Image (cartoon, helix red, strand yellow):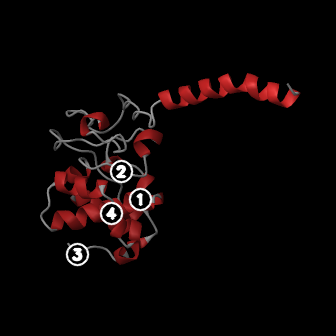
Amino acid sequence: MTKFKRRILYSLPLLVLAGGLIAWLPAHPRPRAVPASHPMPMAMPMQSNQRLGTANVPAFHPHPPRGPLPATQPPSKYSDPRVRTIYALAARIKKVLYQEPCYCRCDRDLGHTSLLSCFVGNHASVCEVCLMEAAYTYKETRKGLTAAQIRKNIEHGGWRSINLNDYMHAPAR
């Protein structure tokens, strides 16, 4: 037997073991626990992705908040007119944003518990996904859809239809 064949023969069990270990690990890590100091009210638990049956849905709250919600950042803080406009819209629909997931995956990276978390801080100001989802949520709310209906549409990518350049001007009062 050649030296090359021996190396392959000895390496094969390690490759099989490594492949089995990779297959055994979960495909998506669970969202991080929200720290106790997090400003979002935690009266309702985050929706478990496993209960949804879809392991790829980011964190959200399945029911409206029971208490007051934190303020979103003031739109005047931002120079980009699209960001200003969408932060203003987000402030109007906080209870709905609280019930929506955010597909930029900030639940994993930043510990966010819903799309509202992005607007309580500055994250949405630098994230087109957050801006598009919030604009979509506002648009669908105006049509009379419920938070659950909007969430289903977001999960199916409906937010991708948003053109952020349509939000260059502040909304009418």
User: Residue at the location (40% across, 33% down)?
Assistant: 30
Residue occupied by mark 3: 172
Looking at the image, which is closer to me, 169 or 129? 129
Q: CA distance from mark 4 to mark 1?
A: 8 Å
Drawn side of residue 83 relative to residue 12, left or right: left
User: Residue at the location (44% across, 39% down)?
Assistant: 108
Residue occupied by mark 1: 129
Rendered location of residue 73, percent (x, y): 36, 54
Residue occupying the far right of the picture: 3
Residue occupied by mark 4: 159
Q: Which mark is residue 102?
A: 2
Q: Residues within 10 Å of mark 1 (few under 14, many from 20)?
A: some
> Which structural element holds mark 4?
helix
The quarter in which the N terminus is drawn is: top right
Q: CA distance from mark 3 to mark 2?
A: 26 Å
Query: Which of the two discs, 2 and 1, labels the residue nearer the N terminus?
Result: 2
Query: Which of the two discs, 1 and 3, labels the residue nearer the N terminus?
Result: 1
In the image, what residue type sits under mark 2? Cys
Q: Which mark is residue 28?
A: none
Q: CA distance from mark 1 to mark 3?
A: 23 Å
> Which structural element holds mark 3?
loop
Drawn side of residue 142 relative to residue 91, left or right: left
> Which structural element holds mark 1?
helix
